[in-house]
Image (spheres, grey):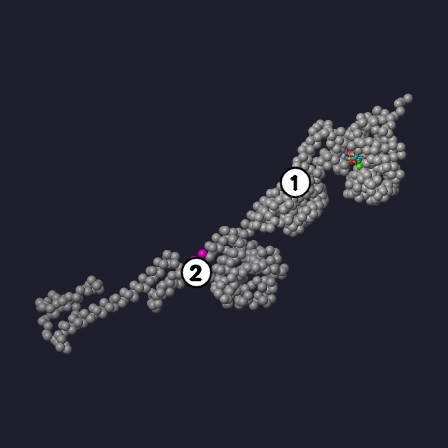
């Protein structure tokens, strides 16, 4: 083999044979120089000169080196290329990418690491995508059901071996359980969600699920803390281990994520599941917040009842066009005299009253009724499946409930309520229409005298408007001097001599003419005008007596009708005393007519006032007797002297055979109670004769005279005059 000998190149021996191998460019080594120092002896080997052999060896070596180099290059470049390509695909977002390098060297290790990383990234991307989808659901206010499904889907992807269940509290007694079933046949996943009733024990156990824990499934079935039969039925059915991941809001366990596993999970293995549970917690919190906002927007903050908006919404649902039109009743309720509480006792007391009123409403109606506060002292009830009779009955119940005293700071207070009723479908099929009709009916109920229920009818609107106009006029009537007193004589049954006169009010209306009391007394009573009006009448009657006295006309007594409402403020005694004093007539010349309604409710204040008046010498008469429910016992309690048989009995005497025994019974009652008996509405001689025979002491009616003006009264038959003095 030739040696490397650069030093030999400088000797005297000229070199006849020398060649150079240029390796520098390819292999980075200095070029090899082959030199023959002496003329080579002709050495042959195997017949060929050695120089030829040398040349062949050199060429073979070079070929070997080239082959080796090429193989080395291929082994390095291909895996590198695949890794580069894989990285590029990963960077482009293809997280399913894998690199195929199966060598056992560094490249193989690198590829394994790459694939591992890609798989992890893939899982993480998937998880993030799942969480993002859940977040989107939360933001779009998806139902808890659909969120549960998404979380379960996600869990299935994360833990293919596991069986997950999500349970949450639907109401105090009902849980809702969501699960994914792997349907056997097509290996399809079925989402199943249903309500499960839960007892108090399960409730108690449920609230003890305060921390994350993994327990052997067997302990769930055996006397463990979680061993409530109901709770157990909520768990994943076939699993050896169960991870319990409760979702708490403060101390309250709102939901539970239970994961059944074949083996005990490694520490940290359920991290992703816990993260999903936390997402679910966000969803519940968002849902709660939304519900709170919804509640706030649709409910009255003072009473907790539905507000106007909430009622409209729920009534709208009930009356939705795509549903069958229901039979329902809408009751519009307005408290009477609420303003007085607010004005006299302040708004805090008014609020307390409204709260009590709303409680009474809620207690008095069926569970499916809608109860709303429209604002102020107005409430609405919607009764599903109610006809006119049911609505009327509920309205009466409500009116009774509202008339009971309210116990308030600073003392009890009595209000009362008026109710307007509208029916679906008779009066309307949409909320606005029904509300409008009920409102009109309410308006009429108030105009006709409060404390009553009024069913809507189409004429009510005009009637109510007319009443409102009349009320406006009535408020002016007293100041304008439009009231007029008429008098109707009462005669002695025995001889027809005028023994008394009943004062009956009339209203000289500037446009409508002379109005009878029936047209305006209820309005005066409901508006509170009855007080001043009654006082005017009392004064007028006493003055009239004084006038007759001066004129020498003998009318022993004048009787004035007194409404029960005039007794309520407790000022009647003072008013009577003042009227007597001003006119100068004796108390014995005055009679007050009250009605039986005073007897019905045990009105102690009214009794006391009447007793005081009677003690003064004023006569008290019980008007319209027989129309109420007075018993003997009640009659004895009332301080009265005179009983007036109602006109209806008198009218029937001639025509209805049953009237006679009734009148007989009334006469017996009056005699037993030692009352002076008067019959009113006597129109015929026959009636007069029968009443006289039955034992009535005084008679009043058209037979003797209609109610007339004071001037006309002077012409009444049986009226006696004082004999001229001297
Ligand atoms: P009332 O106290 O029962 O008065 C008797 C009513 O019967 C009067 O009607 C009278 O005109 C009517 N009447 C009398 N005799 C006959 C008869 O033979 N036949 C018929 N058909 N009717 C007869 P009026 O004047 O229209 O009064 C109606 C009611 O208005 C009274 O019934 C009374 O409750 C009330 N009223 C009248 N004036 C006053 C008043 O000043 N204050 C109060 N609070 N109520 C009054
Ligand atoms: Ca009367
Ligand atoms: Ca009467």
Rendered position, 471 above or below 243:
above
Quadrant of image for the C terminus = top right
Secondary element at tag 1: loop
Density class for disc 2 (Cα within 10 Å; few <14, some 14-19, many ≥20) is: some
For the residue pair 282 and 725, the one nearer the viewer reads as 725
Query: At x 89% / y 24%, what residue is drawn?
Result: 723
Can residue 283 be seen?
yes
**Left or right side of 232 for 80:** left
Quadrant of image for the N terminus = bottom left
Density class for disc 1 (Cα within 10 Å; few <14, some 14-19, many ≥20) is: few
Secondary element at tag 2: helix
User: Residue 158, percent across and down?
Assistant: 47, 62
Query: At x 81% / y 33%, what residue is drawn?
Result: 702
Query: At x 52% / y 56%, what residue is drawn?
Result: 146
Rendered position, 85 above or below 13:
above
**Left or right side of 566 for 331:** left
Residue at numbered disc 1: 458
Rendered position, 677 above or below 304:
above
Q: Which residue of the protein is positioned furthest toward the top in this rendering? A: 726
Residue at numbered disc 2: 123
Q: Which residue of the protein is positioned furthest toward the front in this rendering? A: 655
Q: Which residues are magenta?
A: 124-129
User: Residue 338, percent across and down?
Assistant: 68, 40
Comparing labels 1 and 2, the label whose residue is closer to the camera: 1
Mark 1 and mark 2: span between their CA atoms? 71 Å
- Res. 601 image quadrant: top right
User: Residue 231, percent across and down?
Assistant: 59, 62
- First-in-chain label (1 vs 2): 2
- Res. 712 image quadrant: top right
User: Residue 116, percent across and down?
Assistant: 40, 63
């Amino acid at each position: 083999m030739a040696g490397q000998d650069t030093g030999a190149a400088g000797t005297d021996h000229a070199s006849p044979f020398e060649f150079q191998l240029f390796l520098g460019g390819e292999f980075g080594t200095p070029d090899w120089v082959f030199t023959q120092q002496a003329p080579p002896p002709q050495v042959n080997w195997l017949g060929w000169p050695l120089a030829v052999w040398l040349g062949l060896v050199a060429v073979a070596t070079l070929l070997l080196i080239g082959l080796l180099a090429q193989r080395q290059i291929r082994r390095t470049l291909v895996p590198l290329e695949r890794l580069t390509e894989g990285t590029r695909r990963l960077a482009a977002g293809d997280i399913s990418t894998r690199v195929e390098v199966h060598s056992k060297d560094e490249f193989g290790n690198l590829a394994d690491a790459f694939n591992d990383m890609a798989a992890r990234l893939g899982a993480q991307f998937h998880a993030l995508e799942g969480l993002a989808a859940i977040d989107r659901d939360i933001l779009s206010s998806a139902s808890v059901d659909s969120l549960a499904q998404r979380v379960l889907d996600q869990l299935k992807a994360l833990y293919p071996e596991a069986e997950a269940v999500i349970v949450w509290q639907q109401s105090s007694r009902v849980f809702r359980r969501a699960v994914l079933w792997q349907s056997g046949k097509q290996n399809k996943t079925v989402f199943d969600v249903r309500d499960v009733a839960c007892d108090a024990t399960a409730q108690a156990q449920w609230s003890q699920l305060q921390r994350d824990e993994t327990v052997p499934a067997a302990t769930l079935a055996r006397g463990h803390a979680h061993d409530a039969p109901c709770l157990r039925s909520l768990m994943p059915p076939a699993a050896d281990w169960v991870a319990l991941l409760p979702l708490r809001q403060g101390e309250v366990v709102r939901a539970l994520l239970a994961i059944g596993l074949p083996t005990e999970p490694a520490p940290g293995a359920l991290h992703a599941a816990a993260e999903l549970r936390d997402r679910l917690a966000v969803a519940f919190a968002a849902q709660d917040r939304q519900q709170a906002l919804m509640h706030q927007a649709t409910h009255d903050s003072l009473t907790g009842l539905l507000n106007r908006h909430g009622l409209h919404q729920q009534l709208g649902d009930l009356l939705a066009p795509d549903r069958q039109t229901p039979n329902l009743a809408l009751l519009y309720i307005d408290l009477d005299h609420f303003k007085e509480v607010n004005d006299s006792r302040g708004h805090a007391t008014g609020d307390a009253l409204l709260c009590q009123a709303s409680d009474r409403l809620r207690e008095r109606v069926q569970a499916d009724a809608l109860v709303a506060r429209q604002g102020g002292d107005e409430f609405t009830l919607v009764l599903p499946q109610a006809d006119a009779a049911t609505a009327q009955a509920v309205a009466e119940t409500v009116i009774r409930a509202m008339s009971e005293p309210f116990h308030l700071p600073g003392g009890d207070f009595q209000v009362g309520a008026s109710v307007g009723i509208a029916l679906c479908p008779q009066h309307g099929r949409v909320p606005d229409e029904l509300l409008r009709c009920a409102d009109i009916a309410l308006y009429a109920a108030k105009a006709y005298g409060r404390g009553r229920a009024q069913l809507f009818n189409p004429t009510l609107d005009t009637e109510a408007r007319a009443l409102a106009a009349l009320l406006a006029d009535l408020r002016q009537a007293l100041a304008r001097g439009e009231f007029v007193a008429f008098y109707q004589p009462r005669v002695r049954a025995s001889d027809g001599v005028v023994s008394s006169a009943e004062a009956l009010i009339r209203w000289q209306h500037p446009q409508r003419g002379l109005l009878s009391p029936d047209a305006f007394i209820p309005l005066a009573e409901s508006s509170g005008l009855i007080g001043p009006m009654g006082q005017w009448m009392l004064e007028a009657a006493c003055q009239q007596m004084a006038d007759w006295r001066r004129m020498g006309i003998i009318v022993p007594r004048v009787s004035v009708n007194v409404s029960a409402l005039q007794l309520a403020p407790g000022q009647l005694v003072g008013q009577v005393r003042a009227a007597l004093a001003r006119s100068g007539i004796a108390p014995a010349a005055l009679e007050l007519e009250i009605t039986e309604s005073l007897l019905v409710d045990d009105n102690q204040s009214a009794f006391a006032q009447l007793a005081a008046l009677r003690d003064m010498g004023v006569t008290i008469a019980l008007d319209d007797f027989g129309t109420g429910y007075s018993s003997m016992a009640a009659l004895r309690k009332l301080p009265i002297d005179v009983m007036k048989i109602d006109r209806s009995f008198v009218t029937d005497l001639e025509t209805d055979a049953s009237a006679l025994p009734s009148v007989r019974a009334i006469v017996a009652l009056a005699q037993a109670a030692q009352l002076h008996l008067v019959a009113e509405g006597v129109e015929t001689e026959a009636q007069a004769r029968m009443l006289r025979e039955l034992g009535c002491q005084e008679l009043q009616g058209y037979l003797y005279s209609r109610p007339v003006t004071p001037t006309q009264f002077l012409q009444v038959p049986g009226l006696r005059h004082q004999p001229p003095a001297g």
